[in-house]
Image (tube, helix red, strand yellow):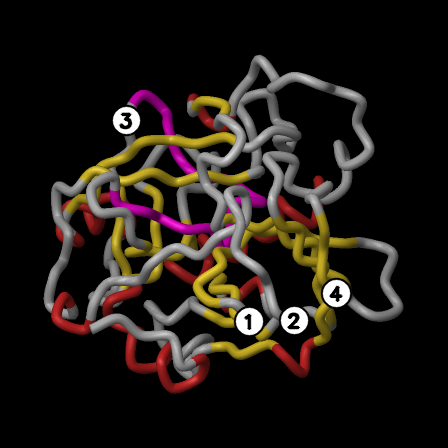
Amino acid sequence: MQLLGGILLLAFAFAFGFAQENGTENTPPDHVIVNGYPAYEGKAPYLVGLVLFTDGSNSNAVGAGSVIGHNWVLTAAHCLTTDSVDIHYGSNRGWNGLYKHHVRKENFFRHPGFGNSAGHDIGLIRTPYVEYTNVVNRIALPKFGQKGERFENWWTVSCGWGGMSNGKLAVWLQCVDVQIISNNECSRSYGSVASTDMCTRMSDGKGNCGGDSGGALVTHDNPMQVGVIAFGSSNCKSGPSGYTRVTDHLDWIREKSGVAYY
């Protein structure tokens, strides 16, 4: 179910990829992402917009990721099945950042468990050096001492440029405040959920949608990224939103990127 949900999110991104990239709106849209709210500039300086390219194809996909180091972006593995990506930094307009980096697939790292078992939809992009500013900055990861923390009932924020309630991709960054639930509660909607995944409760139709894939789930208190957006219900608002659990992949992240917190 997790992998299917992820494919559904990415399929939405392919279908609607650049529908609004060259739009002329100058204010946040009225119809926000699945009942979320428009972010103020600089609310999520760690968030980047991804435009994914396949060589020889005229279609593109969109997703998101998070800056976790000067040379590293964390995202979903299913966002890294293409040939290259444009990474847009430092703007609430996901596909029109302050600047961008173009990165080829030689710099993509998918978790080896992705595609073989559920709960490992997580990946890394090695990037050119990124200088931290007030609008481009890293998000901390959990400490190694928090590996056993499940974060149940913690309040978090999830932001992205994915599908809105009006059926279009967001032009302006949208966020939702959501509460982490137990995997047992999540399983009531999806049949089973891997221990290395986590979910947030669906409330008032709020949830992630296509184009949000790879974005960060960040705690309200002592902000840190605890999840990577990976799957959800097919209509984006009738079930919990699903994430790959970061605490269960800290060793792999350190091995590939050197990024770690103690």
Q: Determine the CA span between mark 4 and mark 1.
A: 13 Å
x, y (%) of residue 150? Answer: 14, 58
Residue 71, disc: 1
244 left or right, relative to 23: left
x, y (%) of residue 234? Answer: 47, 41
Q: Give the residue type at disc 4.
A: His
Q: Which element is circle 3 on?
A: loop
Q: Is 46 in front, or is 215?
A: 46
Q: Give the residue type at disc 2.
A: Pro
Return the disc, 1 or 2, that comes first in the chain's sequence: 1
Return the disc, 4 or 1, that comes first in the chain's sequence: 1
Residue 102, disc: 4
Q: Determine the CA span between mark 4 and mark 2.
A: 9 Å
Q: Give the residue type at disc 1.
A: Asn
Where does label 2 land, which residue? 128
Instruction: Identify the residue at horizontal 83%, vertical 70% (top origin).
Output: 55
Q: Are marks 4 and 3 in contact (CB under 8 Å)?
A: no
